[in-house]
Amino acid sequence: EVAYSQSTGQKEQLSRCLKRGIRRVQDLCKVLQLPALFEETAVSYVQRALQHPSFHLLSLEKKELLGGCCVFVTCRQHNWPLTMGTICSLLYAKQELFATVFLSLQKELELSVPALSLADLVKSHLNSFQLFQPTANIPAQFGEDKEKVVARTLQIVELASETWLVTGRHPVPIITAAAFLAWQSLHPPARLSCTLSRFCKLAGVDLPPPAHLRLKELLEILLRMASQLVWLRMFNLDKKTVVKHIGDLLQHRLVLLKKAFCLHDGEEQQPMATGEGSPPAAQDGDCPLEGQQQREDSPRPLLPPCLLNPRKRLRTAAPRASDSAITGDEPISDSEIEQYLRGPEEVRAFRKAKLW
Amino acid sequence: FKDDLSASPQLFTPMSPYDVDLPIQTTEDAFGSQLNQPKDLSTDFSVDLSFLPDITQDDKEQNLSEDGYEKQKELDGSISRNEDGGIFVDESSLSYPGATQPSPEASGTCHPLIPMTPMTPVTPASESSGIVPQLQNIVSTVNLACKLDLKNIALHARNAEYNPKRFAAVIMRIREPRTTALIFSSGKMVCTGAKSEEQSRLAARKYARVVQKLGFPAKFLDFKIQNMVGSCDVRFPIRLEGLVLTHQQFSSYEPELFPGLIYRMVKPRIVLLIFVSGKVVLTGAKERSQIYEAFENIYPILKGFKKPS
């Protein structure tokens, strides 16, 4: 600290928001142990943002998040695997609020934010799993070499990506499920009896709710692949026993994927006249989607789960012919309008009831 | 993310654009738009050139500039993004589609360089997707031009809801056309939920009539369509991770936030929500031709991501 008379007044020229933003950036970079370059970049984003007219009207609540947002963007631009969830918990911010600030920042400053690299996220996420570090409280044969788990988790995540389990989904639950399967498959005898929730507890990580569903989807994919491995067909594998063979399945995954699923051959569907679609017919002629009654080993189309199990939705009715004839200038009858008006007795009763 | 696209009360909330849940600006950007219409370029490229023979790849490359940003609409979208991937140059899309979809609702606004405006969107059959987006929601506004006593309206109208602590407007609904209106004490009104421009206008007129019958000297001034939402299905799954890589300047794909990819098209200025299932939502239009045009622009781009990687 220097006497005001001797200072260059540089700090005094910065607005309070900017100072706080810069401070927040510095703190986050320290906590996350980010390279020095990141801090410079993030600070420059904060400055640019605060100079942008659209950010002048930002609520204080949101301005608080600006520093964290800029750090987040910087990390993503350098492929440093930082999730929004992590940043939000560090900022004690609601994810919804953070999301609006992030999207505005991206739009107003015209920042290009590359997609999160799943492979990098696997490595950084598994760093926090305690089962891969030698400690005393781990049950017998539960400890595992981190590099082995990371390698296998990466392969499983890649498999998930190829089979449409990743697109549009939260990334962390997929990694949690994949890590669980990888760990189990490296020593099945002792670990098959361990559940996903127990695994997460022992590893000291949160169990995100979608992880159970991701696990189920992964196992379904693996079972279908197993049905194509000649020496596994006779074993009649189920969700538990297939884990023992994950190593083999991953090794031959390219071939197995081709055989287990009908891959698109690029043929386009007959486009429907209306924009709205009914559930899509099978992409290939030789793998019909007969509802749920498919034999376990017959190839099914390789499609995202949302297309395979369409949730029952109220389909909006196709526009009626009478609707398209509307000009907007039709006469409006008195009776039609009067149906919406209360009669005098009704008004009286309403007034009494509501003390209007 | 609120996925309720039918209501857009953000038109009348204080002008903090960051209170909007969906990244859609339905009002004119008061803060300077990054999406300035390139005035000089639009005159060069908005002529209907569908009579020309198919352009080969070499011709297209001559037309590419460093700043593909403004020319995104003018050239076939998939070609101009070629510098990154170049994996999806589709033979069938090499011919130059009609630069702009002639507006079926020509009604007075006329683009100076299009010789004529046919009544229905006309594209050569070989290039069009064959899919027509269906309109799902129209948001319009009208000025009833008189001060309104909202308490009074809520008391005398059966179809009205009024909770001044929650929202400073009466929420009124009618059955046909099935719509909702927000009626403000200033006399301004927002009408949402209609499936066509005409239905929106008819509904707005009915709300105005209700207000008239309640004793207010309501007029019907400055009716305007503020936003149109359409949707359709391309019928194949889409690799969103790939799309965000090759169209980074226009795309935002954050699976942590929202399962769909948000694509901000420059010309026409439309926001598209693209989902892995192949369903596409288009919004931000003031005229339905913008929805059709935006979809015809995005379709060849999406086709490039049809095959699994």
Image (cartoon, rainbow, N blue to C red):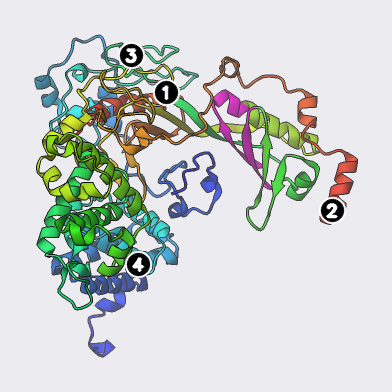
Drawn side of residue B230 relative to residue B266, left or right: right
Give the percent coordinates (x, y) of residue A78: 16, 57
> Callout 1 environment at 10 Å: few (<14), some (14 to 19), or many (20+)?
many
Label 2 and label 3: CA atoms lie apart by 61 Å
Q: Earlier in the sequence, mark 2 or mark 4?
A: 4
Residue A89: mark: 4
Q: What residue does disc 2 label?
A: A353
Chain containing mark 2? A
- Quadrant in which the C terminus of chain A is drawn: bottom right
Secondary structure type for disc 3: loop
Q: What residue does disc 1 label?
A: A275
Chain containing mark 4? A
Chain containing mark 3? B
Badges 3 and 1, same chain? no
Residue occupying image coordinates x 43% and y 66%: A61
> Callout 3 environment at 10 Å: few (<14), some (14 to 19), or many (20+)?
some
Secondary structure type for disc 4: helix
Badges 2 and 4, same chain? yes
Drawn side of residue A215 relative to residue B189, left or right: left
**Tag 3: amino acid:** Thr
Look at the image and tell me whether residue B67 can be seen: no
